[in-house]
Amino acid sequence: MVRRTKEEALETRNRILDAAEAVFHARGVARPSLADIAEAAGVTRGAIYWHFKNKSDVFAAMCDRVNLPVEALCSPERIASQEDPLGSIRDICAFVFRQTVNNPQWRRVFEIIFHKCEMVEDNGAIFVRQRQSHQEGTVKMREHLRLAMERGQLPADLDLPLAVNAFHAAIGGVLAHWLFSPEDFELAREAERLADAFIDTLRLSPALRVGYVPRPMAPLDAEMAALCERQPQQPQQALAPT
């Protein structure tokens, strides 16, 4: 009897998360209420509050159904145990790309995160959770790349903070681009190639080395300033007749 009760509770929890996923995907995150999610799930608001504290908690649990498997693959212990940590990072990157294409749940959740999660006042708690998740991912990525540097797979003079941010932005940028306009390129087919390109940038780009001095951009700055000055000014609002 107890086991049955636990199974029913888990089934209800998953039904709520499935409903939240559908509602957020259709209407964005800011507008829908817990009542909207309850109606979509066919449960009462009380049932939602039995499992979750608030909408932010529902949102985090929905994201965790995708994030937790990725975190398990990216655990520092797992990466450290690999003979080829950089290759493991590359494979995980390609896997995430392919899963985004082939797994409908992953695709919906990432579409919500990248394109349907409005960063507005009503979403303040959700923004904080998203920022925390982003920062935790950055810390893990820094540890992974540091390990690859120690193993001699990345340059010893790699500017690690800059490299981490560039690598993180590259992965997120590809996902956001493809989710917004999937007809632009075949992400599943190009997953390994894109991952290799990102790894090669870490390995080979002089711009990511400590002490790199970029060339001056003053001529372009001056040209852009001149172009901006030539832009038409907004017409002043006409005075109301007296």
Image: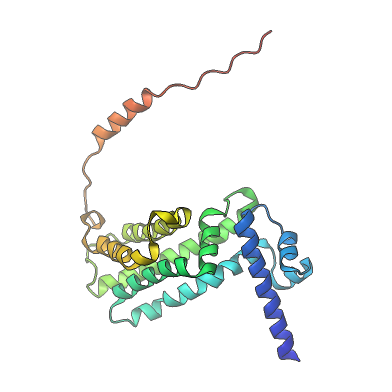
Q: Quadrant of residue 137?
A: bottom left
In the rendered image, residue 180, in percent from the top left (x then y), is placed at 47, 53
* Residue drawn at point x = 26 percent, y = 73 percent: 150
Can residue 212 be seen from the camera position used here?
yes
| Residue found at the far bottom of this picture | 1
Q: Classify residue 16 as left or right of residue 218.
A: right
* Residue drawn at point x = 55 percent, y = 72 percent: 65
Can residue 29 be seen from the camera position used here?
no
| Residue found at the far top of this picture | 242
User: Which quadrant of the rendered structure holds the C terminus?
Assistant: top right
In the rendered image, residue 232, in percent from the top left (x then y), is placed at 43, 22
* Residue drawn at point x = 54 percent, y = 63 percent: 108
Q: Classify residue 184 as left or right of residue 50.
A: left
* Residue drawn at point x = 69 percent, y = 84 percent: 7
In the rendered image, residue 44, in percent from the top left (x then y), is placed at 79, 68
State the residue in front, 198 or 130.
198
Q: Quadrant of residue 152?
A: bottom left
